[in-house]
Image (cartoon, rainbow, N blue to C red):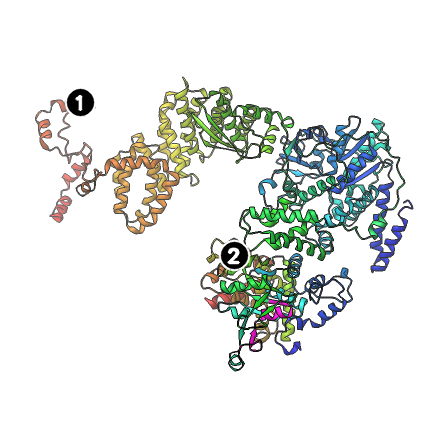
Amino acid sequence: MTEELLRAPAEVKYAEELAWLESVDDGPKPFSWRLSPKMVRLFILGSERADGLDREIGQKWFGDRSFVERAIVTLASDRGLLLIGDPGTGKSWLAELLSAAICRNSTLVVQGTAGTTEDHIKYSWNVSMVIAKGQSRDSMIPSPIMTAMEQGVIGRFEELTRSTSDVQDALISILSEKYVSIPELDDDNIVFAKPGFSIIATANSRDKGVNDLSSALKRRFNFVKIPVVSNKKSETEIVRYRTEELLRRHQIELDVPPTLLDILLQSFADLRKAAASAGSDDEKLESALSTAEQIGVLEDAILHSQFFGDKTLRAATLASSLVGSLVRRQPEDLAIFNKYLHGVVEPRAKKDGGDWDGFLDGGRQAISTLS
Amino acid sequence: MTQTFTALRDQLLGAAEAFTEDPRSVSGILSGIVEDVDRALTEKLEIFPVCHHSPASALAMARRLREKRPSVIYLELCEDLRPILGELRNCRLPVALQAFASDLDGFPPGAGPLSVVAPVTESSAEYQAIAYALDNPDVELVLVDRSVDHVFQWSPELKPEKPSADVDDPEEAAMHGESVGIEIGDLRPGFAELEEHLVHHGKVRHWSEWWDQYVEQPLVDADYDSYRQVMVLIGSLFRRLRPSDRAKEDRDEDRERYMWTRMRQHLASSGADPERVMYVCGAFHAASRVAEFGLDGADTFEITDRTATKWLYGLIPSSHSAIEAQFGLAPGSVSIASATWEKAVRAGAAKPFRLAGQKGGKKPAKAAKAVAPKPPEAVTDKLSGFLAAPSALAVLDEDELRGWCVDIVRLARRHGYLASTADAIAVYETSILLAGMRNRSRPTPYDFQDAAVTCIEKDAVPGRRDVRRLCEILLGGDRVGQVGYDSLPPLARDVLDRLAPLGLDLEKRTLQRALMDLDAKPELRACSRVLWMLRYLLPEGALKPIMGSKELGKRSIQESWDLWIGREQRALIELGYEGVTLEQVFELRLRKSVWDAKATASDALRAVEDSILYLDNPRFTEELGERAVELLSAERTVDDAPEVLKRVRRLLAYYRANEPALPRWTELFVTGGYGHYCTLLPTAFSDEDSGVRQVAAMLGFLFTLENLALSLGCDRAQLELAVRQSHPEAPGKVALLWAAHTQIGVLTIADLRERCADMLSNPLVIPTFPQYLSGFIQALDPVPPLAGFVVELLSGAFAKLPDAVLLPWLPTLITTLKKEAAEYIPMLAREAGRMFPGTLPAVDAWTPPWVGRAEPVAAVGAVPAGPVAAFLAGRPESADAVAALLGCPPGWREAGPGAGAAGELVASHPATVEAVAALIA
């Protein structure tokens, strides 16, 4: 089935692995969970020899172990989980993996936008059926969150802070009372959440101040902050893992030379350092320089090399993708890149040579094209 | 090897064979570890392995001391620190034993000052041993480790650890200053990979948590044999797993040789019974394999002599966070260890020892009763059981966890969090769930901390401290030690005594404010003096004057001070290493500053000022002044000239106002300076490295102190020659030279005005005109009468300079004026005020005084005209008499225009003149 889907959800993609884990899991499971908390952790963070399993479970999310543990125990408790962090830090991916591992359903998702209404969180009506048969449970369209309540599974709310405050506050009663009443119906008018129901919300820390959460809602969520990965080793792992997945998906046979991966990581590290020391927003790139952006740059470079190049990833292509992906404002971002190329990359190319020379040339060319 | 551990060794070797592809290398390590344990345990002299800041070690030590009652204790601590151990009883722990040396002899130059600290906490095994030994007169405590001097001899590149950036309270973390830390029982894997491996597989966040979970907790209630065997095992494991090149680099083995040699020497000289002796050392050293190990070890190690460096010893306050920062431990780990210790003591796990008279904490336990010591028991294998059995799961202490949860919510609320009882419940539940996920039946403080962060921390931290830090505070908090009055060095005691009239408790770490009405209470003047000296000597932040100042010739009537002397106790104590009284230290510092190889004349003058201000010692001031004269004459650059001029003027003014006569050194300084600057003037004018300001200061010295210099025997001709030899090229300096010329009478203001007018009319020179102007502004100091001219010149520049030159120059003018000539602004403003009209209507009718002014024309060649001329022409006698007096030949009135050689030439060849006249007409 996974082949037929452009992007299969985690429970489909790892269905076989999840089934196997469930078969060997003898730990206590809270509510209606399909896996015990320890197994959920193992599914997400991968197995080690010391776990004594017969097969190897790959690591799917890269980050601090304690974040995952805190997220899992929050879901086992009475509160909702709010993953908060910069764009591209893997919040949604973690939420998807958690839902897939706990209840084999990660698709009950509400996407928070400025246009999200309370109906998207509670329920709406099939107007034709209401006209034909009147208001009943049959003519009601439950929201993904309500479906999750009915099934006792995890519901997800992406980008919670993008939706307006009144919509957000609809979650308060769901998280406290754990039921939704349907005043339009005379009987069977309350939907109670079954054990196992919880909500994983994600919020972008860069959206802070757009629609701040109310204190009442805040205290119904446990916050887990996901930082930008700054550990080079973990970052390399993530980029390699996601790139391999990508190559597989596109059926591309192309090698990513380790030296180029190093250059990519180093350039992001340099740009992050520059952003950290910048005095104003004009002095730093608009991009959050997250790991996801790194993967995006590499993906762009790979696809470019595959379809328009000589099927070999080159430093110049990487530089051009880097500039193309990260330059969003002109002239601010271009000026930063110009400074970076001539202040950092050029001396390094002179000193170390190798692929840095090609990287410098590619970068220059990309800047001159955009200028 | 004995047979005790044979079974364990066989089991380990079997495991190595079963689980590894190359069993030889692993089995070597595993069997070696067992051998190490066996050797340490069967040694005749009882070895007590400890780990630093380990409550398990401290508890085992307390229990063992009561059981064994040794008569001699050998402790792994620098042997020369022994005399100050007794002072511990006057202090509130944690404090650090410190050795300090600033006068180095035998170390590379520039290596000093050297400082070593060994922190002591109450929950440490070494403190238990020290308290037991010092409170029992029949017990001898011998420190056996290499001396502090050897620490640096063996590792000359030793540098203090820099505290990491993520410390919550950098102030507390920096309590040890720039010292190198040493501690008993440093037990950590020798290389990062092993530590990372252990932390990763132990599923913990950092080393301190690993240690707490896998060693500390299982050992807290373990019996003595198990404790010893496990500790040696870990010591041996870390020892054997470190890279081989590392073993060569460090001097751990030499330290072991040293300690064993010292112990054997002591045993031989004292005749102590080895059965009643205990050797307390780090577990790492207990697993030693050196030939000198044991009572029967080889005596081949030669202890080298110490260098001639003079070491000073004392105690400085320490804190848990300072210890964590110094030794790279996780924040809060020492506090958590301390909390574990207190909890175990409360639960009756051991009866701890405490030095009689120790400040802080609880009452001391009674001295150990004289119980007959137990005969030594044969060593049995406790390791196999310990390693094979799962660690005994501690029972959930519900009360404790509930207490933590309630307290953290209260604490969080106090720090601005919207935390409620619901959060306390959530923290409780989450702690248990987290502990369960991490295979613990009882949540550790780290689980609790994670749970609290999960449930209480939201998107922003409302106050100064986040939940993680609040948990650390809750679980013990940072504890800051204090050195008691009796253990302070004489200087610190003297300072506290002298400040006693202020009536403040200066040992408190909080801010103390001193308010002094010096006229009403003249006895407080002595305190004020001490405070000013302390302000000079202690680092910034120890005390701050809010009101009052200390300047030459000024006297405060009232003073107000903010004092943090208690918080900066370390700095005060370290000051005590430099001398016995503040005055002595002050004198030493001043002397050092003027005799430094890089000292300049201005440094020496500053020292003179400081000496007058802070010390009442004219002879010493004279000595510093003489040094200033020496330094000035030896100087070959004039970089410091502005500073020298400013200071010497101030000092002269002070002496003139306060002393009947100028001191001898000032006279020497002025006469020497006059000659010195005259000599350097031509070079400074032409040298590109000397700035306009420097040259102006030289001229300022020469012109403004000229009267004094001439009265003391200097010759003005020297200055005139020097000015005449000067040929500057830079416009600013040229302007200065012209100013100097006007001062010595070579150039009149009129000529100067003419030159400047020429420049303004010459388009090629205009771009450099602002630089000339800057030079003239600088010349205001040496030549004050030029003020009017400078105002005139500035007005002229604003009027005539083209915008292209004027506008770019204006910012430079303003910044230069502000930076280098701020003191001349009032003078310029005053002069401008005098010249320009004061009211707006007057401006219209105003003509600048320099416009239309009759130029003084040279007398020769002037055409006599007007009533005065007619009068004089009519009665020429008086003019003739003056002319005769001036030496003019009779008939001078006939020599009018056209006279002389030129006149004759024109008269004999009139054609040219006539042609020119025709052309003009």
Q: Chain of mark 1?
A: B
Depicted B435 relative to depicted B154: above or below: below
Q: Amino acid at mark 1?
A: Ala
Q: Amino acid at mark 2?
A: Gly
Residue toward you, A195 or B724: A195
* Residue A311 x %, y %: 61, 74
* Residue range of the region highlighted in magenta in the rendering: A134-155
Q: On screen, B81 above or below B321? A: above
Is residue B701 or residue B612 the one in the foreground?
B612
Q: Quadrant of the N terminus of chain B?
A: top right
Residue B44 left/right relative to A51: right
The residue to which callout 1 is attached is: B884
Q: Position of residue B682 (x, y in %)?
A: 40, 34
Is A17 above or below relative to B257? below
The image position of residue A232, as x and y in percent, is 63, 58
Q: Residue A223 vs residue B711: left or right?
A: right
Residue A136: in magenta span = yes
Dot 1 and dot 2 residues touching (CB under 8 Å)? no
What chain is tagged by disc 2?
A
Image point (29%, 30%), residue name: B745
The residue to which callout 2 is attached is: A343
- Of the two numbered discs 1 and 2 in the rendering, the one whose residue sits closer to the viewer: 2
